[in-house]
Amino acid sequence: MAKTPKDDPANYPALGRWLMFLDKKKNVDRIVYGLYALCTALFLADFLYYKKVYLDLEKFPGFYALYGFFMCAALVVCAKLMRRYLMRSEDYYAPHDVEAEEYPEDGLDRESVND
């Protein structure tokens, strides 16, 4: 399939051209591994400086990294549990929704096609 002029990356905005490198899985993997390396470096840097703490628990190296990870995971689990109670059926708003109304037949411009 030939590219149309609209699909030509040269016609994309600057940000669109810049983000084209994300089309390759290899580049996305590099970003993910870079984030892993950055998180590991920040975790290890926690061993290198003195911390003034208010609770003894904060003295544990990597406490805030672990706390953030587990709290984020807890938010996801809580959101999944809340979904069971808060989710409504697909037609919950149907009786009062504009989409549920019938379109008047006289408003349609129907044409018959004869072969």
Image: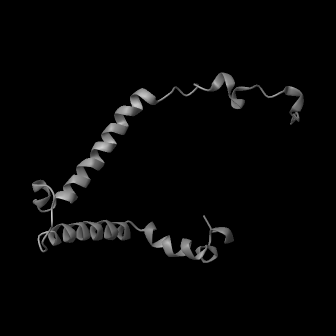
Q: Position of residue 96 (x, y in %)?
A: 68, 25
Asked whether, in this view, residue 51 is left or right of residue 71, the answer is left
Q: Position of residue 61 (x, y in %)?
A: 12, 62
Q: Quadrant of residue 56?
A: bottom left
Asked whether, in this view, residue 45 is left or right of residue 100, the answer is left
Looking at the image, the residue that sits furthest to the top is 95
Residue 69 vertical position relative to residue 24 in the rendered view, above or below: above
Q: Position of residue 104 (x, y in %)?
A: 84, 27
Name the image colouring: one colour
Asked whether, in this view, residue 73 is left or right of residue 3, the answer is left
> Going 12% across and 72% down the picture, which residue do you hit?
50
- Residue sitting nearer the eye, 27 or 35: 35
Residue 2 vertical position relative to residue 71 in the rendered view, above or below: below
> Going 29% across and 67% down the picture, which residue do you hit?
35
Q: Quadrant of residue 32?
A: bottom left
Asked whether, in this view, residue 51 is left or right of residue 107, the answer is left
Q: Position of residue 80 (x, y in %)?
A: 36, 36
Query: In which quadrant is the C terminus drawn?
Result: top right
Q: Quadrant of residue 14?
A: bottom right
- Residue sitting nearer the eye, 67 or 56: 56
